Image (spheres, helix red, strand yellow):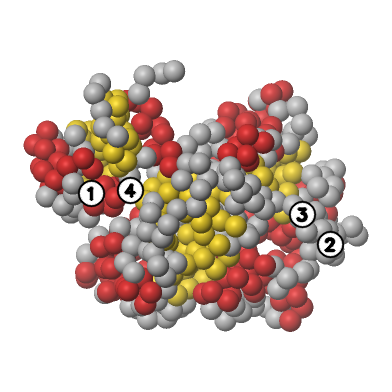
Amino acid sequence: MHPRLHAETFPEKAAVIMAGTGETISYGELEERANRGAHALRALGLGNGDTLALASDNRPEVFDIYWAAQRAGLILVPLSARLKSDEIAYIVNDSEAKALLVSDALADTARDVATKRGGMPGLAHVLTIGTVGNLPEWRGLCLDQPASPIDDEQIGGRMSYSSGTTGRPKGIRYASTGGSPVQPNPGAQLFGRLYGVGKHTIYLSPAPLYHAAPLGFTAGIQALGGTTVIMPKFDAESFLGAIARWRINAAMVVPTMFIRLLRLPEEVRDRYDISSLKTVIHAAAPCPIPVKQAMIDWLGPIIDEFYAGSEGNGHVTINSEEWLRKPGSVGRAVVGEIHICDDDGTELPIGETGTIFFSGGKPFRYHNDPAKTAAAQNPLRPDWTTMGDVGHVDEEGYLFLSDRKDFMIISGGVNVYPQEVENLLATHPAVADAAVFGVPHPDFGEEVKAVIQPACWESATEEFANELIDWCRERLANVKCPRSIDFEKELPRAETGKLYKKELKARYWPAN
């Protein structure tokens, strides 16, 4: 359950393949690179318990750094490659990172961060992966280091920062297990048990590795001894091409990828032999029912879904057979126990909608934010924690999501959950993407607003807006339907599919 063990057993086996170039790193090479990285981190003065921040595109060095930090007792903080230098500075300071590694794909950001070192007093080092001006370079630092393990190995960890969809990013920190880095990986064991992955797996990762699930799942496959194939970024046809070329048998995607795959012409889809694919896992964002149904119709009942978060307080999963019986559900809890509660913290009866809490999962805290940590706890049962989502469970314990609590619209005293409306709009053939949220209304408090990314910008007209409103009214209660629609050429989404709705909503609300 650790790459070192696989390096001893089958050193020539491919641990990492870069789909764009075909560059391959064997388990033996990964072990050497991780050891050199651990020595390099010690040479920088980073010791057990220190924090290392990493902002990078998808490239092989991400795994050198990940496994180096894991055996050097460091807390690794992956940063989105889309962040600006001020946003990076905030997380570096909040996480108390002593070193920051920035990929040369983010050269401008690296230079800008380097000029702002004075605003990050705890940051001792800024290094680049690849050459950027005269900044120190990670790979050069590793070249002269020993390929043997460091003397004071200790297991490290990872602190994920939320994407900030409802506020500033918050770090999610867990208690360290301590001890040797070569120990069973609970997350990898869970993946193996739930999704049948292991040393036989050839896994395709199309998403950015700086996000929690793609990095955690990919590292988990490496812990299990499988082969990971990494796309530089998602492209629908390239995704199918990678499956055919590398004979991929497992992949994890997000619903926006499903939508783009389904919009490929049939002759393009038929061009690739994807019969090797046995497991497709999706998560990170709600999936409209017609989209998931279309994917099952295409690929067969090989699609698994999970609902979880970086908090790790619960894990809910559902396979295709269950989903076909319970369309729209995200499944039943396999880690933690689900409780649906009202605003006072009282548990609600089956079928009623409320805030989703978990008990019995992994304890966590939001780094440097006791108020947010307390807000995630049930007022009556502090050991029950929430990620801020709303939903209900049925009589068999299947969970159905409504939306994030922060995004709920209250219009004339009626609760409206935008996700339902967004899921409907996403199925319109002329809609590429949709965001729904509340805007001020003098009588009702809020009214429903939709912002649409049309499939063709030329259709962004008042006539099309009215057509969509009428189309919604034919399918939903009037109170749920948009009262007005605006158009954007592209909606702000993370590569995981999470919608940065607060950026859109802020345009329609007066500043505090």
**Mark 1 is on which residue type?**
Leu
**Distance between the alpha carbons at the discs numbered 3 and 1:** 44 Å
Q: Are marks 4 and 2 in contact (CB under 8 Å)?
A: no
Cα gap from disc 4 to disc 1, whole angstroms = 10 Å
Q: Eyeballing the image, is 455 above or below 228?
A: above
Q: Quadrant of the C terminus?
A: top left
Type of amino acid under label 4: Gln
Q: Residue at 67% of width from left, 36% of height from top?
A: 370
Indicate the position of residue 390 as horizontal and vertical percent values.
42, 49
Residue 161 in the image, given as x and y percentages of width and height: 59, 44
Q: Residue at x 43, y 79 (%)?
A: 278
How crowded pointer 3 is (Cα within 10 Å; few <14, some 14-19, many 20+) is rated as few
In front: label 4 or label 3: 4
Picture disc at residue 425: 1
Q: 154 or 474, which lies in front?
A: 474
Secondary structure at badge 3 equals loop
Residue where numbered disc 3 is placed: 176
Task: Name the mark on residue 372.
Answer: none
Mark 2 or mark 4, which is nearer the start of the sequence? 2
Q: Mark 4: few, some, or many residues within 10 Å (few <14, many ≥20)? A: many
The amino acid sitting under disc 2 is Gly
Q: How many marks?
A: 4
Res 419 label: 4
> Which residue is found at the position 24% from the left and 23% from the top?
443
Residue at image mark 2: 179
Q: Earlier in the sequence, mark 4 or mark 3?
A: 3
Mark 4 falls on what kind of element?
A: helix
Report how far apart the C-alphas of labels 4 and 2 lie in the structure.
Answer: 43 Å
